[in-house]
Amino acid sequence: MRKILFSIFAALIAVPVAFAADSTPPPAGGDDAPAPTPRVSIFSTSTDWEALTGLRYHEYRGKFIPSSGIVGRGLVLYYLDGFPCYGLGEGVRVWVGPNNKHDGELRIACLYAPEQIKFTWRNATRDADQAESTGILICPVDSSGRDLTIDLGNCEKGPDWDEYK
């Protein structure tokens, strides 16, 4: 019964991403008129992965092995949701500092232990305000039961955000 109710709920809130061009006619004035600006609407695309796969979510907790090559004075990481996992509330932001210091804890719900995970990253001190991150950090994951270990020395820097333009 729980699975059926959850499937109905997920179907009700799952709305595809809708891209709709602005249908407002351009102002009179010929070729010098600006082109219409497309409008983008983004809605939740939540899917009941448990129902679709027959697997169950479990909570996984991550610990980090710092690497002086990337941590510097501190490294702010935000977990990027991706199959088979999604982030749990306050468990998506972690600050990792020099000398094995950290603030926050990675907590994610997964259908199975991931082999790699992605974060946004930026170098900053522990109490730095939230600000634009640098880009993507792709990290292999070692798992033991529900414990994940991420060795930051083995992570690969992906593209910076300005490279996506």
Image (tube, helix red, strand yellow):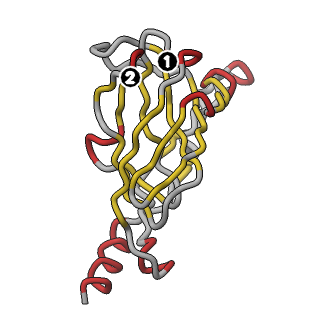
- Residue 11 in percent (x, y) is at 38, 74
- The kind of residue on which mark 1 rests is Val
Q: Nearer the viewer, residue 73 or 30?
A: 73
* Above or below: residue 94 compared with residue 131: below
* Above or below: residue 142 compared with residue 52: above
Q: How many numbered dots are placed on residues in this image?
A: 2
* Above or below: residue 121 compared with residue 64: above
The answer to the question of whether label 1 and label 2 lie on touching residues, with beta carbons closer than 8 A, is no
Q: Which residue is mark 2?
A: 100
Q: Residues within 10 Å of mark 2 (few under 14, many from 20)?
A: few
Q: Which residue is mark 1?
A: 71
Dot 2 lies on which element?
helix
Name the image quarter holding residue 25: top right
> Residue at position x 63%, y 33% from top?
154
- Residue 9 in percent (x, y) is at 29, 74
Left or right: residue 17 compared with residue 14: right
Marks 1 and 2 sit apart, C-alpha to C-alpha, by: 10 Å
Q: Earlier in the sequence, mark 1 or mark 2?
A: 1
- The kind of residue on which mark 2 rests is Asn
> Residue at position x 69%, y 24% from top?
163
Q: Nearer the viewer, residue 5 or 86?
A: 86
Q: Which quarter of the image is occupied by the C terminus?
A: top right
Q: Which dot marks residue 115?
A: none
> Residue at position x 29%, y 33% from top?
104
- Residue 64 in percent (x, y) is at 44, 34
Dot 1 lies on which element?
helix
- Residue 68 in percent (x, y) is at 54, 16
Q: Residues within 10 Å of mark 1 (few under 14, many from 20)?
A: many
What residue occupies the far right of the structure in this picture?
A: 31
